[in-house]
Amino acid sequence: MTNDLIVLSAIGVAILFGAMSPGVSFLLVARTAISSSRRAALAVAAGMGFGALIFAAIALAGLHTLLTLIPSLYTGLKMAGGCYLLWLALKMFRRPSNRLIDSAIVEEVSVSNAFLTGLFTQISNPHTALVFASIFSSALSATIQPAMYIILPLMAFTIDVCWYAVVAYLLSTDGPRLAYIKYRKVIDKLSGGVMAFLGIRLLLK
């Protein structure tokens, strides 16, 4: 029992550090928090968490082996993910900018759309599944206990949601939001540029 707790703690810390590293997920949650609403940002966080749950589950199911045996599958998933990130970047670049819009406090985003955007963004990078597989293979024994197939995906979901919920809460306060309204055009272009860079990087990786 003690050994299981140590293993779970080690895996949890690795997943948390992965979630905390700057990247597409952080950028999307942060931008939603400052440009839309806390509710929408929390929905994005939930979508991110659900995507992490899916990747953790399929990593345990042996996706790493499948992608190794069929390289074209990994390439196809990577291309689809890169194109999705470029599409998000294009949306950010093409947002209209005028005084009437820039004076608005929030950009209306439905909870369902925010959740799906978070989910699709999380699963746009198949490399994440390989990261989960690497973490699990390095920490777990060859014989995985049945309970782990439930515990680990739920743990991945909880860690991702909690971390991005903190980000959503902090950046949806008045200070960051007012700064966004003031520098909206610059922030949108910068966000789009970073998203495009990450999309191209995924395509070329």
Image (spheres, rainbow, N blue to C red):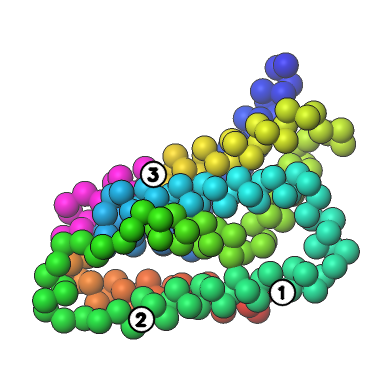
Amino acid type indicated by mark 2: Phe
Q: Earlier in the sequence, mark 3 or mark 1?
A: 1
Question: Residue 82, relative to residue 122: is it above or below?
Answer: below
Question: Is 134 on the left-hand or right-hand side of 170?
Answer: right
Amino acid type indicated by mark 3: Ala
The percent coordinates of residue 82 (x first, y second) are 58, 74
The magenta span reads 165-179
Q: Locate the N terminus and report the quarter of the image it occupies.
A: top right
Identify the residue at image location x=67%, y=23%. 5
Magenta span has 108? no
Q: Which residue is mark 2?
A: 93
Name the foreground residue: 199 vs 55.
Answer: 55
Residue contact at pointers 2 and 1, CB within 8 angstroms: no
Identify the residue at image location x=50%, y=78%. 86
The percent coordinates of residue 163 (x first, y second) are 44, 43
Residue contact at pointers 3 and 2, CB within 8 angstroms: no
Q: Which residue is mark 1?
A: 76
Question: Residue 90, relative to residue 133: is it above or below?
Answer: below
